[in-house]
Amino acid sequence: MSHSGVKGKLIAVIGDEDTCTGFLLGGVGELNKKREPNFLVVDKNTSRHDIEETFRGFLKRDDIAIILINQTIAEEIRFVIDTHNEPLPAVLEIPSKDAPYDASKDSILRRAKGMFSSEDMR
Amino acid sequence: MDSTGETEEKLDSILLEFFSTLDDLYKTQSCLNEDMKNGFLQMSRARYNMGAKAIGPSQYDENKMAASVKITVGDDNKGSNVLIINNVSSVKTETSAKDIPVDTVGLRKRNVQKSEQDEEEPVSHDQKELSPKEETVSVNKKLFPNPLNWFGVLVPQSLRHSQTSFKQAVEHSVKIANLKLKIEGLRQDYINCMGLNFKEKLKLVNDE
């Protein structure tokens, strides 16, 4: 797993420059034994494919418990996030510097809203 | 009829719990938004002071990167997962709490030294106790270098404030993850109960 002294799983971050820098300042950053980081800095040159691959990679890693992702970036790979039904790793959508958080776009909250729709009765 | 009533009561209790959890989730989410907003603002101030390229991914020191915040996955009584935050600062506070009595003992003995000659043994005992304390602190520093140092030794106060805000944001995000896990569990329970309720009602209609 990881090489630091604290036991447990990691928090991964996919976000813009400021979000990643902020959470790394908060002490979540780490490289695993394969020198793979638990964060991805998304800029205007990062392709959707790269984001999707990194997200899928984080989902497969067993040393990650939470994936934090900017909601604007989550919108780009919504189809991947919607298909993730496992409790762990938990995917959290967070605001970015440019765009505030919108609860109506959140995958889990939209799923919870579905409790009261007729689709779940079938 | 009794079983239908029980299921409906269970449905009601699940719904009430669901809405109270949702309320907590919205509150925690607004706290997270506020923390991140403050963090971004302070980071921008620090960037204004230090220069545009002084704070960014190019400054990350990947060789010394080690997570000081980790998550332990536990189980609650209902069988669902609970995420517990596990960070170095809590370890540090534990050690510092242990160190306080050692310091007070040392001070007391310092006063005794002036009057008596028999203190050589307690003083040496003190030194023995102090040396491991220093070691633990240095080990902590080596294992978990402060990410602030990536951006320089004398960083502006605003960057320190930004770090504090993001540390709080990490704590809030773990709380949100727990609440979302709970909501997901309640949703599954609700769907199961609704199915059960529907089947019971169908059975009643068929019997009639």
Image (spheres, coloured by chain):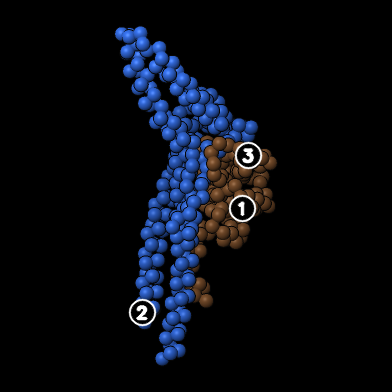
Chain colours: A brown, B blue
Label 2, label 3: how far apart the Cα atoms are: 57 Å
Residue type indicated by callout 3: Leu
Residue type indicated by callout 2: Asp
Residue behind mark 1: A59
Q: Position of residue A84 (x, y in %)?
A: 59, 59
Question: What residue occupies the far bottom of the structure in this picture?
Answer: B208
Which quadrant holds the C terminus of chain B?
A: bottom left
User: What residue is drawn where x is 38% and y is 62%?
Assistant: B17
Question: Is residue A47 left or right of B3 when viewed as pictured?
Answer: right
Q: Is residue B69 visible?
A: yes
Residue behind mark 3: A31
The correct choice, above or below, for A98 with respect to A77 in the image is: above
Q: Tell me which label, 1 or 3, sits earlier in the chain.
A: 3
The correct choice, above or below, for B129 with respect to B19 in the image is: above
Question: Is residue B206 left or right of A47 when viewed as pictured?
Answer: left
Dot 1 falls on which chain? A
Q: Position of residue B108 (x, y in %)?
A: 33, 18
Residue type indicated by callout 1: Leu
Q: Position of residue B61 (x, y in %)?
A: 61, 32
